Image: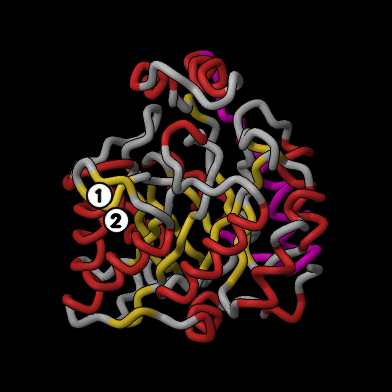
Amino acid sequence: MAKASRKVIMTCAVTGGIHTPTMSEGLPYKPADIASQAIAAAEAGASILHLHARDPQDGRPTPDPDVFMQFLPTIKQNSDAVVNITTGGGMGMTVEQRLAAPLRGAPEMCSLNMGSMNFGIYPMAAKYKEWKFEWEKPFLLASDDFIFRNTFKDIAYILQALGEEHGTRFEFECYDVGHLYNLAHFVDRGLIKPPFLVQTIFGILGGIGADPDNLTFMKNTADKLFGKDYVWSVLAAGRHQIPLLTQALVMGGNVRVGLEDSLYLGPGQLAANNAEQVAKMRGIIEALDLEVATPTETREILALKGGDRVLF
């Protein structure tokens, strides 16, 4: 069984590479705004901050390490939260581009997607008639012919380059049940050692659907594969965020919120910022007589190297 604890690790995914500036005024894309929203999310209760970078001029996803370095030091100086840098990046980026910022920053954690997949965000383009920036609509529509590449060779390279060489540990992102078996393959090869964070993801077109039965199935499969060696967390896209995360809490899991995963605070209500979502989820956690894990507790649970060993 997954490790159950009254201490709930809450991750906040601050901006991501999916939503575009037209969709919400609250979505941060300038480095100062990413930093300030990340710090506020940590103050609200997030112990892990999952971070992407955006072009400061127009908000498009960027892998540029120089842009990451415009907000990473500020976050570290003003928060004790664990910094988790994406290795997924954004649509169309090469593996080398996706690793440029993590290799420079050597963070405590990085995300790591556990399989190649169709990753469809094109249906969102039909919801908007006017756009802030001309790149947004073509970016979304192009995803109907996009394969998010994460081959076995890619995964092994990332585990070695970041894990073995920099002591980075991972948020293993599993979008479908096959990704859990891919993860088990690398555990069997000795490239992944416990305790490891398994982030099961629901509601992305191309991955497993956001259904309560699917959540139970994914957890049962992970229990079978990993026993007590893993820490289980859940994220769900869009309107599924709060219901599925609440289910996960009842089942002993941890949670991820943030404007990367959902732009909303409630039905028809856009979140003004990431901290609003964190505060809402904290309220649910505490209403269930659970406690939010501190960054120190999170580092202990996940056996992280500590914020003093990063390079930013």
Q: Nearer the viewer, mark 2 or mark 1?
A: 1
Residue 312 percent coordinates (x, y): 79, 68
Taking the spot 55% from the left edge, 69% from the top edge, the residue there is: 39
How many marks are shown on the rendered structure? 2
User: Residue at point 55% right, 80% down?
Assistant: 299
Chain part drawn in magenta: 145-170
How is the model colour-coded? secondary structure
Residue 150, quarter of the rendered image: top right
Q: Residue at x 44, y 19 (%)?
A: 130
Residue for point 48% across, 64% down: 197
Instruction: Identify the residue under disc 2.
Output: 219
Left or right side of 257 for 75:
right
Relative horizontal placement of residue 288, taking residue 231 as reference (left or right): left
**How far across and how far down the image is residue 295, in percent?**
52, 80
**Frontmost residue, 46 versus 2:** 46
Marks 2 and 1 close (CB-CB < 8 Å): yes
Task: Please tell me how crowded label 2 is: few (under 14), some (14-19), or many (20+) other residues with Cα within 10 Å.
Answer: many
Q: Secondary structure at mark 2?
A: helix
Q: Check if residue 54 falls in the magenta segment.
A: no
The vertical placement of 213 against 11, above or below, is above
Q: State the quadrant of the N terminus.
A: bottom left
Residue 293, compared with residue 234, is above or below; it is below
Badge 1 marks a residue whose secondary structure is helix
Task: Give, as a three-letter code, the residue at label 1.
Answer: Leu
> Compared with residue 272, is residue 133 higher up or lower down, i.e. above or below?
above
Q: Quadrant of residue 25?
A: top left
Above-or-below relation of 274 to 212: below
Task: Give, as a three-letter code, the residue at label 2.
Answer: Lys
Pointer 1 residue: 215
